[in-house]
Structures are given as structure tokens and as C-alpha cells.
Amino acid sequence: MNHVSVLVKGWTWIPDNLDNLYSCNCGLSCLWTKSNVLADKPDAVLFETTTPPLQRRVGEPLRVYMDLEAGRKRSGLEEIFISYHAGDDVQATYAGALFHNGRNYHVSNNKNNDVLVYWSSSRCLPQRDTIAKKLLKLLPHHSFGRCLNNVGGPDMALSMYPECANDANLTPKWWDHLHCAMSHYKFVLAIENTWTESYVTEKLFYALDSGAVPIYFGAPNVMDFVPPHSIIDGRKFSSFEELASYVKSVANNPVAYAEYHAWRRCGILGNYVKTRAASLDTLPCRLCAAVSRKGGRNARS
């Protein structure tokens, strides 16, 4: 198959006006669309928030199901399953630019030396808030968002860092300035909702991309996804006091802090290369290749 078309049903990460033709390195041209007209006979249909049909016959599109949540549950009705895990049919990591559409990409050249940690959360989950509260009481920090806010409100980032504002004619949203605001801090606290193997979300990659050092609580195999010596894994410390003491020592030692950024200067990306290569940005071509290998509409059930 030299041309593959995928009709997208209910995927929350793609805009409604999706209509993209990709030229893939594997020699395929891949049409991704939400339009039934453009893909009147698609080779596959991608489902995320809806369930695939119960049956598929030869000549009908392959059923693709995607679940990027921590539970990672197959529908049981798909021929191809997409998740964040490398063990599934197609992997889609949270690295890449897709989660940053429309965001202010300004990265500050200066780091705050008095307030060390950035934290932002507007979904106040008990486990996550408990960890944040215990650690942040030991470290100078700014807490944005609704949870544990200590800066005077969820929109204070734009007042504190006006360079993070986007188009003045648009109503700002909290995620527009997220990347830019955290770039002003040496450290960003990143806590996953669920601590599951390989479940490494945009919370960590936002911090890396902003030029900060993430203090991370989450997937036990997180180092499979990030550059070497680029994050502080909070789970490796015996207490919050020990972790806070270590963060302060790194912040006060220019050489130690610079070592967490050596991968940026030296281009030593390690596992991060594979993580970016398997991101949502590259999913269209990789899924099309998987559909092509199965034979598309002509595949046997």
C-alpha cells in the first residue's frame, strides 16, 4: 500500500478541522482526517472516546483503538491498539509539540535564585496535593493553578511574567503561559496522577522543554524516557527532608546544577531520542505504517 487513509473519530488531541496529508519516511502518503467525505473508504478508523464497532468484515476499515490513560485498557474490538506503552501495537508518548499548540514558547534566560520551585495544578487530587504540600513547605516556591496556590490567584503568572502573554486580542488560558512561566525557575515539580510503569505524561516533558530541572514523582521506569541525569526522581529519596536538602544543595552549586543540563549542551539524549520518535507528533505515519503492514481494508479479520 502506497497510500493509507485514517478516519479519526473522537480523538481529543486533534482539532475538529483536521485535514492533513503526511508524506512518511517509509514511502507512504497518509491522510488523516475527521471528514467522512475526504475518507469515504478509509483503510482504518481511529477511535478514542468512542468504542469501535462490534464486527469488521473484509473490505471494511481496520479498527484502531487508542487509550493513553494510565489504565491502558483495550476495547477488545480493535485490530490495532495504541497506548503510551512500548509493549502495545503502536506507542504514543506524551513528548513532542502536539500538547504545546498555541503556547508561548518564550524561555527565560534568567532563573529565579530566591524562589526555586514552580508548581502548577488545577485538578486537586488528594495524593498529589499531599506530596506537593509536604515537599513545598520545605522549599521556596511559587504555586500557580487552583491547588495550593500561594501567588494570589491562578492567572498571576501573566502579571509576574508579562512576556508570557500571547495575542493581546485573545482571552488568555492558563495553559498558554505554562511553558513560559516555568522557564523562570530552576526546578519544576511534576507529579503524575497515577504511578504506573511507562506512564510518563506531558507534566514531565513540559518541564524539560522549558529549560528547568523536573522534580518527578511517577513512573518507576521514568529514566527509560528522559535524557541521562536530567531529572530528580523524588521516589529515590528516603524522606521529603532529604529530597529538599538535595534540591537546595544543587541550586546553590552552579556546577552541580549545570550537570543536570549537560545533555542539552552535549547532545547526549539517550532514551529521549526514542521517546520523541514515538511521540504523538509522529503517530500519523507510524500508525499508517502499521495499517499498511496489516493490509488495510483488505486485511483478514
Image (tube, rainbow, N blue to C red):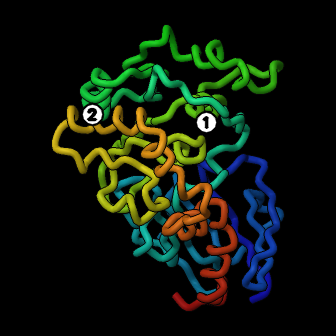
Separation (CA) of disc 2 from disc 1: 26 Å
**Circles 2 and 1: CB atoms closer than 8 Å:** no
Instruction: Give the residue pinned by disc 1.
Output: 179
Instruction: Place residue 190 in its image quadrant.
Output: top left
The local crowd at label 1, few if under 14, some if 14 to 19, many if 20 or more residues have their Cα within 10 Å, is: many
Q: Can residue 36 be spotted in the picture?
A: yes
**Rendered location of residue 67, percent (x, y):** 46, 59
Q: Quadrant of the N terminus?
A: bottom right
Looking at the image, can residue 53 be seen?
no
Residue 269: horizontal and vertical position, in percent? Answer: 55, 65
Q: Please state which amino acid type lies under the numbered disc 1.
A: His
Is the residue 220 above or below the residue 74 in the image? above
Position of residue 142 in the picture relative to residue 32 (left or right): left
Instruction: Identify whether 1 is placed above or below 188.
Output: below
Q: Quadrant of residue 128?
A: top left
Crowdedness of circle 2 by 10 Å Cα count: few (<14), some, many (20+)? some
Lower position in the chain sequence, tag 2 or tag 1: 1
Q: Amino acid at mark 2?
A: Ser
Figure check: 13 above or below 163: below
Which residue is denoted by mark 2 in the rendering?
A: 245
